[in-house]
């Protein structure tokens, strides 16, 4: 993924344009919860405008059953919200807008923040 981002930025610089804008859609899985704090450092200085974090809400196979974030109680949910707030604040230090579209954390958005009519998706592989 980082190589693709670097290639896009190189091409933008070569042609002296400010588009396309680069936004990251990050699927937070339970197995990646411990690593989420590394995201701002990984993506800083790469011309990324926005990072949108979502969670797995559709479990397509048994392999993903344990990847959905579930909280045992309100305290665990509150701890998660605090960690996400730290992540959002840390992103601001690097000029990164980070949004977490997890229902327990954010209000329901009236429209899709990804603007699917004007977006291009590039998989990490």
Image (cartoon, rainbow, N blue to C red):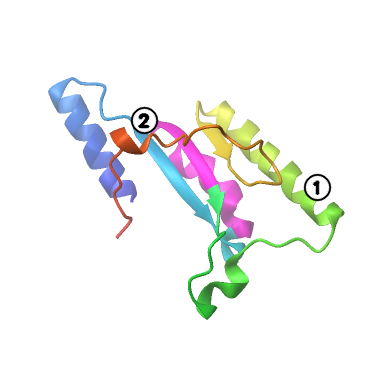
Labels 1, 2: front one: 1
Sequence-wise first label, 1 or 2:
2
Q: Residue furthest bottom?
A: 62
Magenta stretch: give its range. 33-53
Image position of 124 (left or right of 51): left
Q: What residue is shown at x 66% (from left), y 35% (from top)?
A: 107
Q: What residue is shown at x 58% (from left), y 68% (from top)?
A: 67
Q: Is residue 97 magenta?
A: no
Kindly indicate the quadrant of the structure image that contains residue 47.
top left
Q: Nearer the viewer, residue 89 or 71?
A: 71
Relative to 93, residue 7 above or below: below
CB-based contact (under 8 Å), mark 1 and mark 2? no
Q: Label 1 neighbourhood size at 10 Å, few (<14), some (14-19), many (20+)?
A: some
Numbered marks: total: 2
Write down the residue under mark 2: 47
Image position of 34 (left or right of 13): right
Q: Secondary structure at mark 1?
A: helix
Q: What residue is shown at x 50% (from left), y 30% (from top)?
A: 96
Write down the residue under mark 1: 78
Query: In the picture, which quadrant includes the C terminus?
Result: bottom left
Q: What residue is shown at x 57% (from left), y 34% (from top)?
A: 109
Q: Label 2 neighbourhood size at 10 Å, few (<14), some (14-19), many (20+)?
A: some
Whole-angstrom CA distance, mark 1 to mark 2, is: 32 Å
- Measuring from the top left, give residue 100's x and y in whole percent: 59, 41
Q: Residue furthest left?
A: 15
Q: Nearer the viewer, residue 57 or 44?
A: 57
Kindly indicate the quadrant of the structure image that contains residue 53.
top right
Q: Secondary structure at mark 2?
A: loop
Relative to 14, residue 1 above or below: below
- Measuring from the top left, give residue 89's x and y in whole percent: 64, 31
- Measuring from the top left, give residue 111's x and y in whole percent: 49, 33
- Measuring from the top left, give residue 117's x and y in whole percent: 31, 35
């Amino acid at each position: 993924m980082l190589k693709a981002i670097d290639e896009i930025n190189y091409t933008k610089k070569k042609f002296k344009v400010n588009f396309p804008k680069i936004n990251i859609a990050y699927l937070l899985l339970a197995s990646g919860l411990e690593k989420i704090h590394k995201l701002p450092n990984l993506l800083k200085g790469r011309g990324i405008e926005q990072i949108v974090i979502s969670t797995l809400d559709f479990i397509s196979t048994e392999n993903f059953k344990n990847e959905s974030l579930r909280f045992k109680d309100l305290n665990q949910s509150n701890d998660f919200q605090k960690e996400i707030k730290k992540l959002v604040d840390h992103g601001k230090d690097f000029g990164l807008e980070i949004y977490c579209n997890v229902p327990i954390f954010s209000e329901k958005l009236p429209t899709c923040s990804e603007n699917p009519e004007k977006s291009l998706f590039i998989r990490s592989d």
